[in-house]
Image: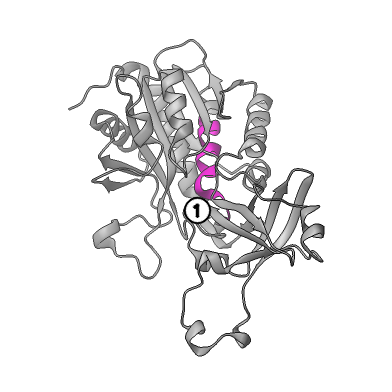
């Protein structure tokens, strides 16, 4: 399977931090409707693309479309914007980055600044840059000029294009987790009316607490729900396999086991992968999965939930990297699982 790079590029480029996902949601919805899928949107902005409406069982595939970003808190007399983070940023990743501010009257490009190394004391040079020491500069003359383009409450995201690397691998901001939404939609498109009902969910606000997943699971009442997310690729320096397991790029989907994961659904996914000859690894979640599954599982009287993840290098950075072979294998696994699900339902705990 080759990636639809035009759609993926548009989905990744659309600025949409948690609580401000309307632009990637629009891209997702337009693509779903171009495939002839029925679409819906809930009160908080999650978008659902539905294949086989009314069939049973109902499978929800949840890929969250919010990205980590910045929220402007103050504009000073020099026109510099001071900010806090939306989601989990490593402050070192932000130094010197270019950003896109989503202003009320249009987008504004800026850069993240800090005191140059030449003007730092030897002690300052040894310190880690803190968020409170960083600011956004849009080239404004002063505060009044800056406030014509941006204001407290505006959000910003990293301004980085999709990069094409060796072996077809790609790097971009927002792969966590627009790639999950991309996969969910591709699965719904391929399955169509060949199984039960499949709902591809472009879910909001995962990075700040799973608001979209909680609402989706409560309102849609799926029989089975799968969070499609990213996991840490372990084929980079400094990551210990004894703690994280082995999930290099090219190793296929990671299937999570442990807290919040329904053992029956996990075994069904593993059995499907083995029957289809799809490579996979197993990831452990002893406390929580830190994905939408933690919120899907608790809906109503409980939702049979699992996690399927794509290995991702440099998570929560401007240059997250995935292998298209892994994306293709996740799609293949979930298409096969969706087609098998009517014969497996209801899935029970072992």
Residue toward you, 306 or 338:
306
Residue located farthest toward the top when viewing the structure as drawn: 54
Rendered-image quadrant of the N terminus: top right
Main secondary structure found in the magenta portion: helix
What residue do we see at 31% from left, 57% from top?
Answer: 246
Judging depth in this view, the residue of 120 and 255 nearest the camera is: 120
Q: Is residue 263 visible?
A: yes
On screen, 170 above or below 288? below
Residue 255 in picture, x, y percent from top left: 33, 42
Q: Left of 155 or right of it: where is 59?
A: left
Residue 53 in percent (x, y) is at 52, 13
Which residue shows up at 59% across the image and 44% down it? 3
Magenta-drawn segment: 170-187
Q: What element carries label 1?
A: loop
182 falls in the magenta region: yes
Vertical position of residue 249 compared to residue 286: above or below: below
Q: Mark 1 points at which residue?
A: 323
Q: How many numbered discs, if any? A: 1
- Asked whether the viewer can see residue 160, the reply is no
Residue that lies at the very extreme toward the left in this rendered image = 350
The quadrant of the image that shows the C terminus is top left
Quarter occupied by residue 147: bottom right
List x then y, in percent, for residue 314.
47, 60
Residue 245 image offset from top left, x and y in percent: 28, 56
Q: Badge 1, how many Cα within 10 Å: few under 14, some, many 20+?
A: many
């Amino acid at each position: 399977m080759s990636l639809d790079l035009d759609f993926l590029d548009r989905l990744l480029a659309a600025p949409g931090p948690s609580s401000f996902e309307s632009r990637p949601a629009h891209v997702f919805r337009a693509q779903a409707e171009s495939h002839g899928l029925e679409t819906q949107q809930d009160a908080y902005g999650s978008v659902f693309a539905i294949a086989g409406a009314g069939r049973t069982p109902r499978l929800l595939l949840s890929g969250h479309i919010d990205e980590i970003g910045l929220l402007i808190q103050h504009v000073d007399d020099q026109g510099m914007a001071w900010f806090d983070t939306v989601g989990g940023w490593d402050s070192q990743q932000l130094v010197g980055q270019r950003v896109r501010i989503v202003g009320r009257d249009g987008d504004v490009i800026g850069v993240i600044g800090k005191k140059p190394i030449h003007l730092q004391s030897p002690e300052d040079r040894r310190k880690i840059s803190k968020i409170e020491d960083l600011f956004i500069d849009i080239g404004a003359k002063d505060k009044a000029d800056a406030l014509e383009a941006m204001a407290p409450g505006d959000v910003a995201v990293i301004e980085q294009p999709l990069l094409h690397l060796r072996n077809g691998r790609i790097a971009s901001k927002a792969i966590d987790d627009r790639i999950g939404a991309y996969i969910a939609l591709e699965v719904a498109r391929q399955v169509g009316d060949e199984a039960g009902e499949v709902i591809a969910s472009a879910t909001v606000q995962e990075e700040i607490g799973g608001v979209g997943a909680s609402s989706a699971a409560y309102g849609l009442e799926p029989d089975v729900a799968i969070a499609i997310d990213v996991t840490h690729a372990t084929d980079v320096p400094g990551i210990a396999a004894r703690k994280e397991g082995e999930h290099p790029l090219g190793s296929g989907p990671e299937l999570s086991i442990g807290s919040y994961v329904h053992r029956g659904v996990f075994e069904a996914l593993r059995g499907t992968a083995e029957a289809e000859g799809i490579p996979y690894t197993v990831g452990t979640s002893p406390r929580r999965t830190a994905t939408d599954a933690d919120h899907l599982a608790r809906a109503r009287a409980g939702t049979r939930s699992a996690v399927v993840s794509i290995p991702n290098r440099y998570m929560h950075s401007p240059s997250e990297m995935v292998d298209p072979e892994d994306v293709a294998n996740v799609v293949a696994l979930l298409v096969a699982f969706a087609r098998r699900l009517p014969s497996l339902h209801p899935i029970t705990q072992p």
